[in-house]
Image (cartoon, coloured by chain):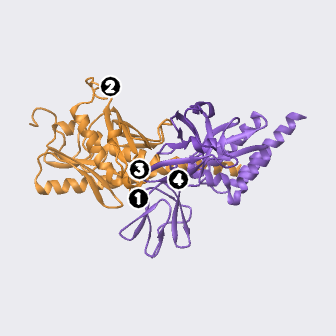
Chain colours: A orange, B purple
Amino acid sequence: MSEKHEKLIDKKGIRLDGRKADELRSLKLEVGVLPNADGSAYVEHGKNKILVGVFGPREVHPKHLMKADRMVLKCRYHMAPFSVPERKSPAPSRREVELSKVIRESLEPALFPELYPRTGIDVYVEVLQADGGTRCASITAAALALADSGIPMRDLVVACAAGKVEDTVVLDLYDAEDKLGAADVPVAYMPNLNAVTLLQMDGQLSPEEFEKAVNMAMDGCKKIYALQKEALKNKYMTTKVETKEETEE
Amino acid sequence: MPTFFEAKQLVTPGELLAEGEFQAGENTYVEAGKIFASRIGLVDLDNKKVNVVALRAFYVPKPGDIVIGSVIEVGFNGWTIDIKAPYTAMLRASDVLSRPFKPQNDELSQVLDAGDLIVAKIASFDRAHDPQLTVGEPGLGKITRGQLMRIVPTKIPRVIGRKGSMISMIKTETNCQIILGLNGVILVTGKNPADEELAMRVIKKIEDESHTTGLTDRITQLLKEEKAKREEIKQ
């Protein structure tokens, strides 16, 4: 297989995009970017660009989805037509419906649905540019947007993938590695509670490789978690710094 | 029984706050004997109670709260009111008319129409039922003049200040009547738009800087400066 294309990892263990096996892509997180939404976040994870808006808790529509004893979480993962090299039809595809469900289920354990019965939260995930690992970046951003909207949470949810390319277990696969590599293991995780909320595997791994990949992904999650907390705090730190300068004058 | 924070520290959801003989206060939860934060905010230790003063939250109705809302629908025997909460509120016709309500005699839209704004009190609310409003007390009812603004509802106590010091200062300095809806909606009524404008600017400043220290001094300063400016214009 590897004869047909360039080697994904060279002899020194450096990947095609110049990263080491256990290195994350560059990450930029921003909170509160959409004034019209109750909560929002924007993430740039490598070449992924994802915008998340959260609304609610509010009345549930359509009415039949309402639960008398708890709050419902609705999620929509959507890729913009220009997010991939070949135009993607804006209609929801099978993959998008599945990812919406996967993202919803990985966020649900972080909430307290019993607190606000008969209401619903809407999470809108808009992928502006995709380069592999969008479900993980979406979960990371959606958790930030939820926290920004003031919805009580047990913990922030962080997600990160690990996988196998050319017989090496690597962290945070990008598009080419995802497509040409041997396996992909996305993990969503609540670091403070040490609870995994999403674990998927695509491809084949030996039990040892699988364990290594999961541990690697969880370590990656912890690194992203630190950035996530920083992004959330940053929004309020800026006003704090400004006022400090004011008093110094 | 340690705590894991400094006073007034900014915390994010999921942050471990305390362990052992502490009580979980506002915006916190307990898991396996440990207290965690559930919202972004500033931690405070009040006796043995760990509280997080939330920086972002939404309004949850509570019986007895004064709120400001708008009529979204005129129904058969009452109105549906949007109170900027997860639940829409109901206001019964018999409550407003203060006499038995007869559908054949009374046209409800002549009393309150869609889009009208009201100051009301939450009469009842529980998990199973939407909030009921009442306007049967002095100071409540339809709003006829003034300007509205919205802030994050958790910051209303900061606008009120200790024993109402902040709000009474703003009221006297700007010559405005101010009604604070606990749902985060504020009605400012003054003699002229400039007074209202100033009061709103001050309240906005309090909202933006509610988590910083020395806020009262800065607000006093701002009000003084504005007053001085006006004196200059007059002369």
Q: Report how far apart the C-alphas of labels 2 and 4 lie in the structure.
A: 50 Å
In this rendering, is residue A196 above or below B105? below
- Circles 2 and 3: CB distance less than 8 Å? no
- Circles 2 and 4: CB distance less than 8 Å? no
Return the mark for residue B124.
4
Q: Secondary structure at mark 4?
A: strand
State which chain disc 4 sits on: B
> What residue lies at 46% left-to-right and 46% top-to-bottom?
A149
Q: Quadrant of residue A222?
A: bottom left
Q: Residues within 10 Å of mark 4 (few under 14, many from 20)?
A: some
> What residue lies at 60% left-to-right and 43% top-to-bottom?
B100
Q: Inspect the image, locate mark 4, and give the three-letter code of the amino acid beneath it.
A: Ser
Q: Where does the image place residue A69, in percent across and percent down from the top left?
A: 36, 52
Q: Secondary structure at mark 3?
A: helix
- Please name the residue that numbered disc 2 is placed on: A82
Q: Nearer the viewer, residue B8 or B56?
A: B56
State which chain disc 2 sits on: A
Q: Secondary structure at mark 2?
A: loop
Q: Report how far apart the C-alphas of labels 1 and 2 lie in the structure.
A: 36 Å
Is residue B194 found left or right of A15 in the rendered image? right
In this rendering, is residue A58 above or below A197? above
Q: Where does the image place residue A218, in percent across and percent down from the top left?
A: 28, 55
- Please name the residue that numbered disc 3 is placed on: A228
- Circles 3 and 4: CB distance less than 8 Å? no
Of mark 2 and mark 3, the one earlier in the sequence is 2
Q: Is residue A238 visible?
A: no
Q: Report how far apart the C-alphas of labels 2 and 3 lie in the structure.
A: 27 Å
State which chain disc 3 sits on: A
